[in-house]
Amino acid sequence: MAAITAPASAQSVATTSATEASDNQLGEIVVTAQKREESLQKVPVPIAAFTGATLAARGVKSIAELTFITPGLQIGSQNGSVQPFLRGIGNSGAAVGNESSVAVYIDGVYYTTVPSGAFALGNIARVEVLKGPQGTLFGRNASGGVIQLITADPSHSQKLKGNISYGNYKTVNGDLYASTGLSETVAIDLALSANKQFDGYGRNVVTGARNGYADYYTARSKLLFEPSTETKITVGAAYSYSKPSFQGGTFPGTTHGTFTAPFVQTPTVGFFDRTDDIESFTSFKQWLVSLKAEQELSFAKLTSTTAYIHSTSYGRTDGDFSPRPDFDIVLPAKTKQFTQELQLSSLMDSPLKWVAGLYYYHSLQAYSGVEFRGTIFGPGFDTYGKQIADSYAGYGQASYEIIPKLSLTGGLRYTYDKAKGSGGSTAPGAPLTAAGTVTDTASTKKVTFKAGADYQLNDDALLYASMSRGFKSLAYNIIPFGSHNEPEVLDAYEVGLKSDLLDHRVRLNLSAFYYQLKNPQVQLLATAAVILSNADSARVKGLDLDITALITKGLTLRINGTYLNAKYKVYGELDAAGNCTIRCAPSNPPAPAPGYGTLPPIGIQAGGNAMPRSPKLSGDIGVDYVADVGSGTLTFTADYSYNSGYYFEPDNFLHQRKFGLISGQVKYSPEGNFYVSVWGKNLNNKHYVQYAGAQNGPAGYPFTGGAPRTYGLTLGFAF
């Protein structure tokens, strides 16, 4: 603390948007976590931020790979749908109708559905991971935090850059970005990304098809119109397609069997292999159009953000994961989303920093003609369901320096959510009519808030404390249609320190937090059903540590870690006979005999159990080294990502043990506009499970494995 409170160096650091270090000092990172551009070190909010250059140097190509460079963030993928968990807060529900507890935004637009291939990071200017509730500044309330992706704005000068990679498993990956001015006031850009994996990490030993792969391509464009220095209008459009393989196989150490006689155990196969009688996959298509208008007024800045997103998906899976045609499912789904946000914010030089806004959200999420076929269903049946959600919110937040160096912050938000659900079942191929359809409506009114204080010890050290509340809205069960779960509400308490030491050669950020969670949302997979429900309460306490040190010219050391203690407090009550009476946790015990898999679900008391995807310790240690070699530059980056292990479900049966992954990249840029790099991820080839879930009956415990060792060569250019 003596070093922290010592007088600041007289030499200032220029504000930049890059994390690249100079010869003598670390650079700053500019973020927009509080809806205005500020230095990361001046924002009293725990944030992990990365520029596009940093992500490229560390080989991060997708949103899911943020897991390995952001301790406390776990991003899984169930059948191609991204599932973020931040500081233990999240839910594994990938069903249509459910939203994430950690909201994802691109250029200020909230995404209800998050297919993994839609967020290739080819033209990303910056990624910000905001930890804790973010309801008073972001349009769609989020209980766990926000992942905010900001893409580059079009440039009036001509720009062209791109890269192409080839890696093992016959994987081809490429990015292309182009921008140019059309006139003195108009500019346009185009960003393209694609990934094609011709070989899977494993295969289907029955059909011979590949398994363990992810194909995608995305296109994103912006048209920028600046008729004056006070007006900025941005029109955006995007399209993405992705096709990842489906979960499958059997979680290591468990079994699965067959639904029909003779009841036998399905043979054990390789970690990335499966035994389906059909190819299982999910394909996603997503379209976006958006309009963002920014107008500088005499007293404030007015911003309007309008967006429409249309997503469709088509899934086909072997529901019993066996060579027999016992249980096949076809899952067509769609999501239509419209959002409108009006925001008024103070000017940059205003002593009172404030933001006020109105937000409207509308979504239609539906399954239409879901087909259940196979010998266990006889002729089979079709089911359908949909949820229409509307949300209206008004919010505001203000900060003011009440005495020199001490600022107070207050924020308030009122939200009214209304949801209508409906659904039913029909005979195979019968028209999906209103006859037999069940409907229901529900609404929620919530007031959320934030209160905080920060004290600038000196120019290079900031102390802060805050308390805040956020919530995640309810969702209907729509496969098959049934009841809805309750909103989850999180109260967060946080204290932290942000500091630059030793003349800006060392950056040390610390935070300690405590969460109280009411009605945490959970998901259970059952035969022919996805069930969304709630626990009673949970609590999370933890610590964050981020250190960046410029060791010597060109050599930077990074040490980041998160400690979590995330447990359910109350989850289920049992009577004297051991029977579940109130809100018990679902559990599918393993079946000891043919046909193996799991026994029918039972209710257990899970108070004291660890929350899913909440490792006690996660961290990253990395080095960056840049050296002049002849007329060019050699860059070396290495990371070791550690995870102490986590559970996948509230009963704490499925458990991923501790693991560590080594990744690195060597890049050479000769004099000119080209570069070549050699890279590798999970170089120690650790097997780990990034998603698993119990399913009722012989299907057992299917899972999705994290990527094995991958490596390749990249050629790139920039003009």
Image (spheres, rainbow, N blue to C red):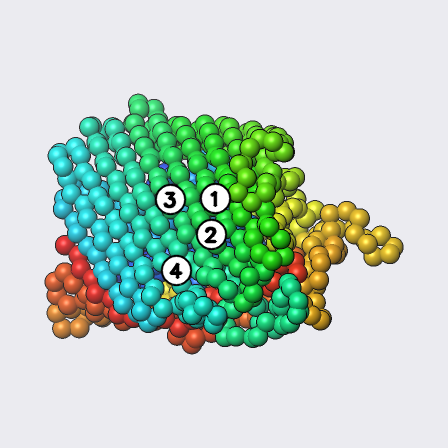
Answer yes or no: do the residues labelled 1 and 2 have beta carbons within 8 Å?
A: yes
Mark nearer the viewer, 4 or 1: 1
**Residue at the spot 33% in from the left edge and 72% down from the top edge:** 168
Name the element at disc 4.
strand
Label 1 vs 3, first from the N-terminus: 3
Lower position in the chain sequence, tag 2 or tag 3 = 3
Say which residue label 2 marks. 315
Circles 2 and 4 in contact, beta carbons < 8 Å: no
Pick the quarter of the image with the C terminus: bottom left
Mark 4 vs mark 1, CA separation in Å:
20 Å
286 sits to left or right of 86: left
How far apart, in angstroms, are the residues tagged by discs 4 and 3?
Answer: 16 Å
Instruction: Specify the amino acid type for callout 2.
Output: Gly
Q: Amino acid at mark 3?
A: Gln
Q: SS for tag 1?
A: strand
Q: Which mark is residue 214?
A: 4
Q: Which of disc 2 and disc 1 is earlier in sequence?
A: 2
Do tag 1 and tag 3 residues touch (Cβ < 8 Å)? no
Picture residue at 41% right of the left edge, 52% below the top: 283
User: Extreme top residue here?
Assistant: 298
Spatial CA span between label 2 and label 4 = 14 Å
Count all numbered tags in the image, as a single digit. 4
Mark pair 2, 3: CA separation: 15 Å
Mark 1 vs mark 3, CA separation in Å: 12 Å
In the picture of the structure, the residue carrying the numbered disc 3 is: 286
- Amino acid, disc 4: Ala
**Amino acid beneath label 1:** Ala
Closest to the observer: 465 or 543? Answer: 543
* Secondary element type, mark 3: strand
Q: Nearer the viewer, mark 1 or mark 3?
A: 1
